[in-house]
Image: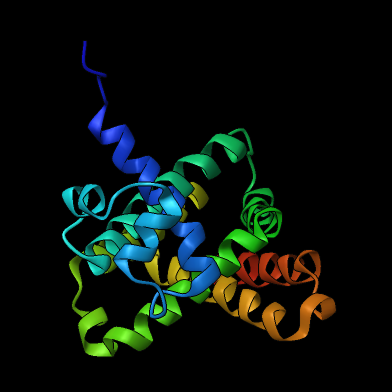
Amino acid sequence: MPKVVDRAEYRRELLYKSFELFAQKGYGSITMRQIAEGLGVSTGTLYHYFPNKEALFLQLVQEQTEQDILNFLAEASDIETLEERVGAIVQYVAKYENYFFNQMVVCIDFYQQHGRSNIAHNEILQRSWEDTRLAISDYLQIQDLEVADFIITFIYGLITERLYMSDRVPFEQQGLILKKMLIAYLKES
């Protein structure tokens, strides 16, 4: 009797395992053949699920965005106040700092390979940003999507700063500053 494979689950498994390979070797340095070898599958199997490395990466971004939002909400859904919710976002990123650091580095490498104009008009990347900003806006119960954009930019900036300065800029301290800024801004608007 042939083995029954849940194709969608198997595809997700390949995506998540490929993230580790992208993080280790870099998007621009790894080939589909090397990804297949690293995943322990044939190149044909990998091409069956993903037509090329760019498609694999973009589907990975989409899947990670969806899963990151779900994971965060599962961990932080019982928090009541705005101050606590802002703190929960910063704490979540701090808890998974290496994961988010690797995500950012791989995305920068992807950007270097494809250029700004290709990325700026990519539907999957735009949707991932939009999903993230809507999730933040909904979670914080704020209507101003520019505030959500600011929070995302702040978090990426904090991750970048920690890349260069390691522990010099603590998440907790920056989270307190972000909370104070947001509370003051939202009270004025």
What colouring does the structure picture have?
rainbow
Q: Quadrant of residue 146?
A: bottom left
Which of the two residues, 145 or 162, is positioned nearer the viewer here?
162
Q: Nearer the viewer, residue 58 or 149?
A: 58
Q: Position of residue 131 (x, y in %)?
A: 33, 56
Residue 32 percent coordinates (x, y)? 30, 65
Quadrant of the image containing the N terminus? top left
Residue at the location (39% across, 41% down)? 13
Q: What residue appears at the point 66 percent right and 62 percent down from the top-left corner?
A: 97
The residue furthest right is 168
29 relative position to 43: left or right: right
In this picture, residue 23 sits left or right of residue 125? right
Answer with the quarter of the image where residue 111 lies: bottom left
Q: Is residue 94 left or right of residue 154?
A: right
Above or below, 9 against 15 in this view is above
Please report the residue visible at 28 percent of the width from the left and 63 percent of the height from the top.
58
x then y, percent, for residue 142: 45, 56
